[in-house]
C-alpha cells in the first residue's frame, strides 16, 4: 500500500509540473510599456479612429490594436511582448530610432499602424504593406428615376459630396470635377446629403462606404431605406485601401498576412474571428482580405 501511495504521489507531481510548464508555454504575449530587446516596437504617428487610438497610460484600442492582440503570438518570432511608440511623420521603419531608453539605448520599429493607406503619397515606396485589410470604396448614388445612368453622365450634375475620401476621389477625376465644379456642394453628414438628393437639390451623392453603409436615413421622423428610392452607379470613383505597414522587404509582412488568414479562415481556426472585429469597428464587413501562402 505504501509503495502504491508513492507511485501515485510521483505521478501527481509529474502532472502538476506538466500543467505548470504548459501554462508558461501557452501564456499569450502582451502589450507592454517597458521596452527591451525582446519587445516588438510598433510605430504610430497619431490617433486615427476607428483604426488606432492610445490613452495617456499607453493602453491601445481600436481595430488594429484588437487584431494585433489576437495575432501577436503568431508573428512575434523571438519577441516576448510588444509596445506602441509615437514617431514623427516620415519615420522610416527598420532604419531610424523610434525609442531611446533612460540609459541611451536606442530601439527601431519594424511595423506601423494608424490607418495607413496604400497608394497614398510615397507610402508604397516607403513601406511594405500586407494584403489589403480594409477597403473603403467611393461610390455614387442617384434617384431611381434619374437620367444619370453611369459615370459618363456625371459631369455637370449637381453633386452632394460627403467625406474627405469622396472629395479626394472626385478631385482625382478631373473631367467630372471640372464640369461639376460650380454645382458641387460638400455636406458634413450623409443624412444632409441624401436629404438634398431627396429634395432634388442634388442630382447625385458621392460618398465613401464608411459613411454610406452605417447610415440610417431618416425622413420626416421615419427611417427610409435608401434602396427604396436610390440606385448605386456601377463601379466606383476610387477605392481607399488600408493595411499594416512593415519595414521594406521585411518578412514580418508575410507573417502578418498568414496570421490574419488563420484568424479569418475556419480551416485554420474553429471559427472566423476576423470578420466580427471588422464589423464591430466599421458597422459592416468592410474587408475583403484574402491571402494565399507562398507554399500553397
Image (cartoon, grey):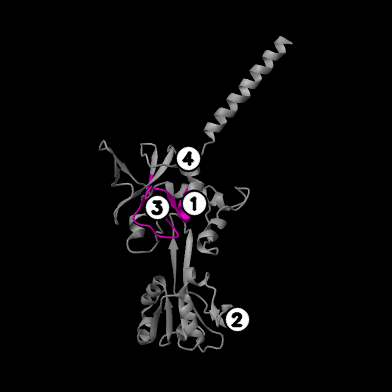
Q: Identify whether 118 is placed above or below 29.
A: below
Inspect the magenta stretch and tell me whether residue 77 lies in it.
Answer: no
> Looking at the image, is mark 1 or mark 3 nearer the viewer?
3
Residue at label 2? Answer: 228
Q: Secondary structure at mark 1?
A: helix
Q: Identify whether 131 is placed above or below 184.
A: above
- Residue found at the far top of this picture: 2
Q: CA distance from mark 3 to mark 2?
A: 41 Å
Numbered badge on residue 240: none
Label 3 near label 1: C-beta < 8 Å?
no
Inspect the magenta stretch and tell me whether residue 66 lies in it.
Answer: yes
- 35 and 139: which is toward the camera: 35
Counting residues from the start of the chain, the first of labels 1 and 2 encountered is 1
Residue 191 lies, in percent from the top left, at: 49, 77
Q: Secondary structure at mark 3?
A: strand
Numbered badge on residue 29: 4
**Mark 4 closeness class: few <14, some 14–19, many ≥20 residues within 10 Å:** some
Residue at label 3? Answer: 54
Counting residues from the start of the chain, the first of labels 1 and 3 encountered is 3
Q: Quadrant of the N terminus?
A: top right
> Looking at the image, is mark 3 or mark 2 nearer the viewer?
3
Label 3 near label 4: C-beta < 8 Å?
no
Q: Secondary structure at mark 2?
A: helix
Amino acid at each position: 500500500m505504501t509503495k502504491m501511495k508513492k507511485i501515485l504521489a510521483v505521478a501527481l507531481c509529474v502532472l502538476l509540473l506538466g500543467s505548470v510548464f504548459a501554462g508558461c508555454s501557452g501564456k499569450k504575449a502582451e502589450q507592454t510599456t517597458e521596452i527591451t530587446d525582446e519587445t516588438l516596437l510598433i510605430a504610430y504617428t497619431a490617433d486615427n479612429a476607428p483604426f488606432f487610438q492610445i490613452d495617456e497610460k499607453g493602453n491601445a484600442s481600436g481595430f488594429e490594436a484588437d487584431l494585433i492582440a489576437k495575432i501577436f503570438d503568431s508573428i512575434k518570432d523571438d519577441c516576448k511582448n510588444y509596445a506602441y511608440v509615437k514617431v514623427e511623420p516620415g519615420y522610416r521603419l527598420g532604419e531610424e530610432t523610434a525609442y531611446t531608453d533612460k540609459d541611451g539605448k536606442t530601439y527601431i520599429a519594424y511595423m506601423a499602424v494608424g490607418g495607413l493607406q496604400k497608394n497614398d503619397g510615397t507610402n508604397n515606396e516607403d513601406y511594405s504593406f500586407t494584403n489589403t485589410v480594409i477597403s473603403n470604396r467611393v461610390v455614387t448614388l442617384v434617384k431611381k428615376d434619374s437620367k444619370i445612368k453611369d459615370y459618363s453622365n456625371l459631369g455637370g450634375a449637381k453633386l452632394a459630396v460627403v467625406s474627405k475620401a469622396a472629395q479626394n476621389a472626385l478631385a482625382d477625376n478631373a473631367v467630372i470635377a471640372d464640369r461639376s465644379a460650380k454645382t458641387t456642394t460638400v455636406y458634413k453628414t450623409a443624412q444632409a446629403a441624401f436629404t438634398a438628393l431627396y429634395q432634388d437639390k442634388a442630382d447625385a451623392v458621392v460618398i465613401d462606404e464608411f459613411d454610406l453603409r452605417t447610415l440610417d436615413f431618416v425622413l420626416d421622423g421615419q427611417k427610409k431605406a435608401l434602396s427604396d428610392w436610390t440606385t448605386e452607379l456601377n463601379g466606383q470613383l476610387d477605392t481607399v485601401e488600408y493595411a499594416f505597414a512593415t519595414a521594406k522587404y521585411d518578412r514580418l509582412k508575410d507573417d502578418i498576412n498568414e496570421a490574419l488568414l488563420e484568424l479569418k479562415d475556419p480551416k485554420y481556426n474553429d471559427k472566423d474571428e476576423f470578420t466580427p472585429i471588422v464589423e464591430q469597428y466599421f458597422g459592416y464587413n468592410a474587408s475583403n482580405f484574402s491571402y494565399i501562402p507562398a507554399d500553397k
